[in-house]
Image (cartoon, rainbow, N blue to C red):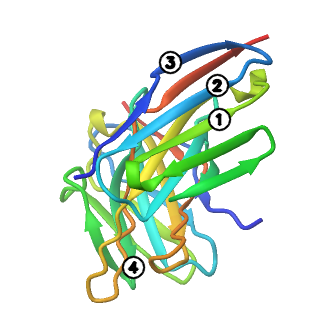
Amino acid sequence: GIQVEQSPPDLILQEGANSTLRCNFSDSVNNLQWFHQNPWGQLINLFYIPSGTKQNGRLSATTVATERYSLLYISSSQTTDSGVYFCAVDRIFNAGGTSYGKLTFGQGTILTVHP
Amino acid sequence: EPEVTQTPSHQVTQMGQEVILRCVPISNHLYFYWYRQILGQKVEFLVSFYNNEISEKSEIFDDQFSVERPDGSNFTLKIRSTKLEDSAMYFCASSGQFLAKNIQYFGAGTRLSVL
């Protein structure tokens, strides 16, 4: 199956710092999503970004599909940004019109932002 | 914004007991999923469900597990005889699109504790 690797595994920042999280994947994908898992365990959708660049406030993401990686940028980090960031990818096999849509997750990056 | 709803938020059970985890997907979605996350680990795919049948299942999804869409709104995961190693966070997800823009929306999760 497809492999997803995230780096770094852990990241510690002071409030106000910027950071870049990376996601490498081993095959072409139809879907790539970035999630933030908050301290309560909830998975919050950040971006759907199988290719291109998107921005949402202090967060932005870029996926270079041809080179099989995606980057998540966090600017001016805040303590509420702390948590685990997951990248997840999906290869959809179109067999008889059925979409399987199985997401494969990376191991995550644990981000800690200190005040 | 529509959301995926999961109940209960926390389930405690004795080993060997049956549990049913419940999910209400987003109303116009057609594809449904269950994932699990053992504490401190990555999120793993269990099963996908479309058109009232299982589309794909992982090796984890053995005979102890079953899924059902008993009516037009609920989607359930049943574990027949729970084991200690079934303790995990279980996430339900749904998506509405075929192939293109297959964004999966996740519920807040059910934390299952098997004693």
In the image, is A8 to the left or to the right of A18? Answer: left
For label 2, the residue is A19
Amino acid type, callout 3: Asp
Cβ atoms at labels 2 and 3 below 8 Å apart: no
For label 4, the residue is B50
Marks 1, 3: nearer the viewer: 1
Cβ atoms at labels 2 and 1 below 8 Å apart: yes
In the image, is A22 to the left or to the right of B41? Answer: right
Work out whether disc 4 and disc 1 sit on a shared chain. no
- Cα distance, mark 3 to mark 4? 37 Å
Residue B31 on image: x %, y %: 46, 74
Marks 3, 4: nearer the viewer: 3
Amino acid type, callout 1: Tyr
Residue A86 on image: x %, y %: 50, 39
For label 1, the residue is A73
The answer to whether residue B106 is seen in the rendering is no
- Cα distance, mark 2 to mark 3? 12 Å
Name the residue: 59% across, 22% down. A111
Callout 2 crowding tier (Cα within 10 Å): few <14, some 14–19, many ≥20: some
Disc nearer the start of the sequence (1/3): 3
Residue A11 on image: x %, y %: 56, 17
Q: Is residue B56 above or below residue B114?
A: below
For label 3, the residue is A10
Chain under callout 2: A
Name the residue: 63% across, 33% down. A40
